[in-house]
Amino acid sequence: KHLFLVDKTKDCSVPRSLWLGCSSVAESLCALRCLQSIPSSRAHNQTTSGMESQSLVDDLSPKKNTVLKLSNGPVVSRKRPSEGNYEKEKEHCIALFDQWSEADQVEFVERLISRMCHYQHGHINSYLKPMLQRDFITALPAQGLDHIAENILSFLDARSLCSAELVCKEWQRVISEGMLWKKLIERMVRTDPLWKGLSERHQWEKYLFKNRTAEVPPNSYYHSLYPKIIQDIETIEANWRCGRHNLQRIQCRSENSKGVYCLQYDDEKIISGLRDNSIKIWDKQTLECLKILTGHTGSVLCLQYDERVIVTGSSDSTVRVWEVTTGEVLNTLIHHNEAVLHLRFANGLMVTCSKDRSIAVWDMASPTDISLRRVLVGHRAAVNVVDFDDKYIVSASGDRTIKVWSTSTCEFVRTLNGHKRGIACLQYRDRLVVSGSSDNTIRLWDIECGACLRVLEGHEELVRCIRFDNKRIVSGAYDGKIKVWDLQAALDPRAPASTLCLRTLVEHSGRVFRLQFDEFQIISSSHDDTILIWDFLNVSTNGQSEGRSPSRTYTYISR
């Protein structure tokens, strides 16, 4: 039942492959006894009962390697010298193999492989590996499928795209003709506000999102542009970390009472609400006052605008809707009994809050068609700020609490407790709420579970305004200081508290009332009757703006 190789010159010794193939010492000893019990091949040749010997030779003759199989053991192999008729037999086998169907060929090869040892399997694997690899990027264009090759490579990041260009000339041709560096930059501009802002400010957006025309530069232009963009981004990030900025100042020159309570800006203009009851619109480039809107009989405490309207809230208890371009009053909402402290509107919904402790939810069908949907009551002191999205309305009050309400049903959901004094400001986005309080601290909250994730300490007086994006929190306080915090570090419970405040900016001589920021700048307003523009993009080595003449050089202090 067992097949063994007989050594023709001397007594059998145990092959190393046999020892390695045995799964236990017992099997090894059994194999040794079996091998030693076989008579020499010379004795076999001299016997007249040669039927078994001839059968053995017949079994072995067509094979270059002889297979040994132990009972309950693995297949092992021992090499023997090639015989003269090997080449003829090999050619005959190949001729027969070529006549079989693909399925029969596969089955035959599988059976051959199953009879080989592990060492042979390794050789076969090394032989097959390069045969199984395909240069699909080169092969696809040859089949007229250039667009598929381009689409595959278009998913690469910059580092991988650089490596792909070095593979061969054909890969480089696909990348160049497919304008893949252009597509990579376009993808970044679509998804990253920093890239989008740079494309607008540095004027290379005009070469993006266009079909192949004479106006579009070659792929090499975009290849060289990419590292320049990365260098600009690194410079901006370093400016934020080090506090390097160019400072511009708008003197509001209020007639009677001084102070700028609220503001909002875009690339062309800044709209501000003042303590002297007026709304002033400023040219963001020249810093000149373009228009003054009057009508409120009290200080303008809050505002928001879009491309059509400006909505303002005042200490005269009213909400007014203004036409952006003409400054005409389109609507006046009289509902709250005391000052309107904050408001937000988006997607046909507006929420206002008041010193009268209530929150009003409005449906905005049009600037002239605004109707009250619901009044939310639950706070025990003035409601200082509101924010909302499609899921939640979030409000904060002088009663030290943050309350969460359902946007769709206006039902109360939960209360966030933790601040030790009244809350003056907050922002809400996704699951994160960031709030500032007269206890001089900033708190980060998970709105879904109500947990306080982190407390930021550093301001010396009431934290009056706060904003955050994906990277930073920027806060302003009655101590006249603006602080920049690392948001990602603040969300990491392992980060030491001493590493969270990146920079403290001091230029205002009075309380900071409101601020807004983006990737390139902070714009803030204060009780000192000024609006400051802190520019982190156009900063030269000596602190002067490149392309502008600032009123003064940048100034910063460390934490």
Image (cartoon, rainbow, N blue to C red):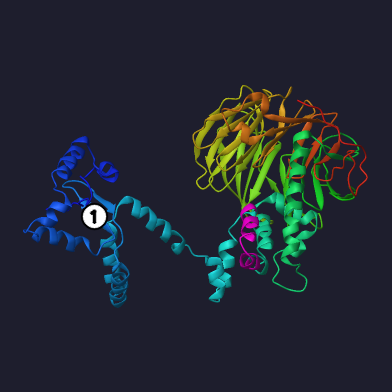
Residue toward you, 165 or 481:
165
Q: In x, y percent, where is residue 52?
A: 10, 58
Residue plotted at (64% across, 59% down): 166
Percent x, y for residue 470? 64, 42
Magenta highlight range: 159-174
Image quadrant holding the C terminus, namely top right
Identify which residue is drawn at 67% across, 24% down.
Answer: 498
Element at label 1: strand
Q: Residue furthest left?
A: 49
* Horizontal side, residue 321 vs residue 148: left or right: right
Residue 505 appears in view:
yes
Would you say residue 306 is visible in this rendering? no
Residue drawn where x is 14% and y is 47% of the image: 38
Say whether residue 83 is magenta: no
In this rendered view, identify the residue nearer to me: 37 or 142: 37
The amino acid beneath tag 1 is: Val
Could you tell whether 124 is left or right of 259 in the image? left
Q: Nearer the viewer, residue 177 or 188?
A: 177
The spot of residue 503 in percent (x, y) is: 75, 31
Q: Position of residue 127 (x, y in %)?
A: 42, 60
553 and 211: which one is in front? 211
